[in-house]
Image (cartoon, grey):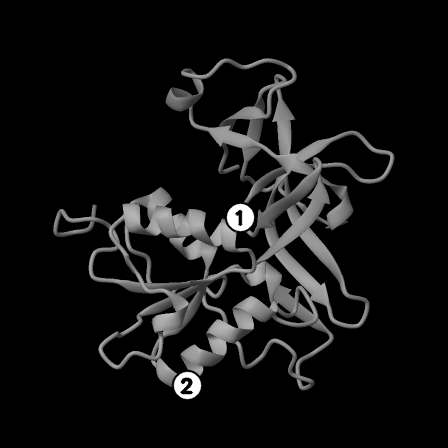
Amino acid sequence: MNENGGPLFEGFSIVMALEKSDHENKWIDIMEAVGATVVHGSNIDRKDIKVDIILVDSVNMPPHVTAQPPRVGKILNKVASYQPNAIVVDLSWATQCIVQRTLLQTDDDRRYRVDLSKGNSPNKGRIQDIYSIKVKQFNGLTRYEVGDSIQFAKRGGEPSQGRIVSITHNRLTKKNSVEVKVMEKHNECELMDGGKGVYTVKIEESELEGHVVILSGKDFDDVAWSKDSNVFLQKKTLK
């Protein structure tokens, strides 16, 4: 629901530009369910249609990959010609709007806005800040974003838990580096969040082992916890 009591995306005209049509169709269903008007890519050039937002999966675009998927590039080229005022944002924006039940500004956080002019610019530095990656694991691809709570393990070490605070892409080696704020584990199921003892480590994306869920006391009491669980109780400290 939006601030007027209507559907969250009521009044928004959106074009989906995803690499795979089946994935795109699922997102079309989601966006229509929350009130958006979804415009088909073939109708972008119609004079009676105004497009507000183009939703893309930024992990399938430069600098994560060498070039835009042809299907996505075709839509974005039409957008540039016929809908120059439309903005391009990552799927994480729509996801966070739905999770937080509020319409987030697209320019409040750089992880959302996709700047197509800078993807392969030769003037950019060797190290580039990015906000999400996809890692091959669990018989498929797992997406990780800045802010995610995760489990990781340095080579040969025991698993640890933490939160992703930054991701950088090396344009020369094409490798990604993940900076993680480490959380101290207590009593098997508690993770200490904050305090002077907090430190960060740099890991390779191959050292990521999956997501964990961190809940407050009331929410944690409603779930079943076991030693094999990926659900933890958040314990905050200011010391």
Looking at the image, is mark 1 or mark 2 nearer the viewer? 2
User: Quick check: 46 above or below 65?
Assistant: below
Please say if the residues under marks 1 and 2 sit with CB atoms less than 8 Å apart.
no
Residue matched to label 2:
81
Residue type at the position of mark 1 = Gly
User: In terms of image quadrants, where is residue 49?
Assistant: bottom left
Residue for point 70% across, 33% down: 160
Q: Secondary structure at mark 1?
A: loop
Name the residue nearer the viewer: 112 or 33: 33
Residue for point 46% across, 56% down: 91
As drawn, which residue projects farthest toward the right?
156
Residue for point 40% across, 68% down: 41
Q: Position of residue 148 (x, y in %)?
A: 55, 44
User: Quick check: 232 above or below 196?
Assistant: above
Dot 1: within a 10 Å radius of its alpha carbon, few (fewer than 14), some, or many (20 or more) residues?
A: some
Which quadrant would the N terminus be assigned to in this image? top left
